[in-house]
């Protein structure tokens, strides 16, 4: 179980990154437009795609970190017999 601070921190990071990414992309586009004569179209596209992939990766990482403890996972009854859970552990039982 994560601490409350880690949960709040991850939640705020998701919000901050999602607000900052568009401004980073705008700065990158402006820089690319200024250097248009020096940069080829392929280079500009590569930079844009790499910034987008890195940004989405960060957002996905913080999303998973925030909600990893809160997601509901279904476990089959046979798997529950094999695993030892501490008393008072809350989980859902389900079958595909």
Image: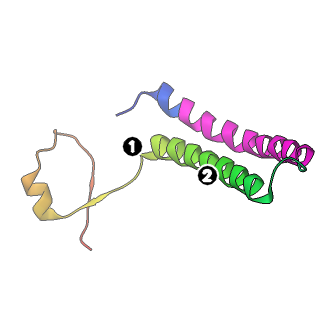
Question: Could you say where residue 19 lies in the image, as x and y percent from the top left?
Answer: 74, 42
Question: Could you say where residue 48 lies in the image, as x and y percent from the top left?
Answer: 73, 52
Q: Which mark is residue 4?
A: none
In this picture the colour scheme is rainbow
Q: Residue at x 89, y 50 (%)?
A: 36
Q: Is residue 66 magenta?
A: no
Residue indicated by mark 2: 53
Q: Is residue 14 magenta?
A: yes
Q: Nearer the viewer, residue 16 or 5?
A: 16
Residue 36 vs 94, above or below: the answer is: above
Question: Could you say where residue 50 lies in the image, as x and y percent from the top left?
Answer: 64, 50
Question: Could you say where residue 25 lies in the image, as x and y percent from the top left?
Answer: 78, 46
| Mark found first going from the N terminus, 1 or 2 | 2
Q: Residue at x 15, y 43 (%)?
A: 85
Residue indicated by mark 1: 69
In the image, which is nearer the foreground, mark 1 or mark 2? 2
* Secondary structure under the numbered disc 2 in the rendered image: helix
Q: Nearer the viewer, residue 31 or 76?
A: 31
Q: Residue at x 77, y 53 (%)?
A: 44
Q: Residue at x 49, y 33 (%)?
A: 7
Q: Nearer the viewer, residue 62 or 69?
A: 62
């Amino acid at each position: 179980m994560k601490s409350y601070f880690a949960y709040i921190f991850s939640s705020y990071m998701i919000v901050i990154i999602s607000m900052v990414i568009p401004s980073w992309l705008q700065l990158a586009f402006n820089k690319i437009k200024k250097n248009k004569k020096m940069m080829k179209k392929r280079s500009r596209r590569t930079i844009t795609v790499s910034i987008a992939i890195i940004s989405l990766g960060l957002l996905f990482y913080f999303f998973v970190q925030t909600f990893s403890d809160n997601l509901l996972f279904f476990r089959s009854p046979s798997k529950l017999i094999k695993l030892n859970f501490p008393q008072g552990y809350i989980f859902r039982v389900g079958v595909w």
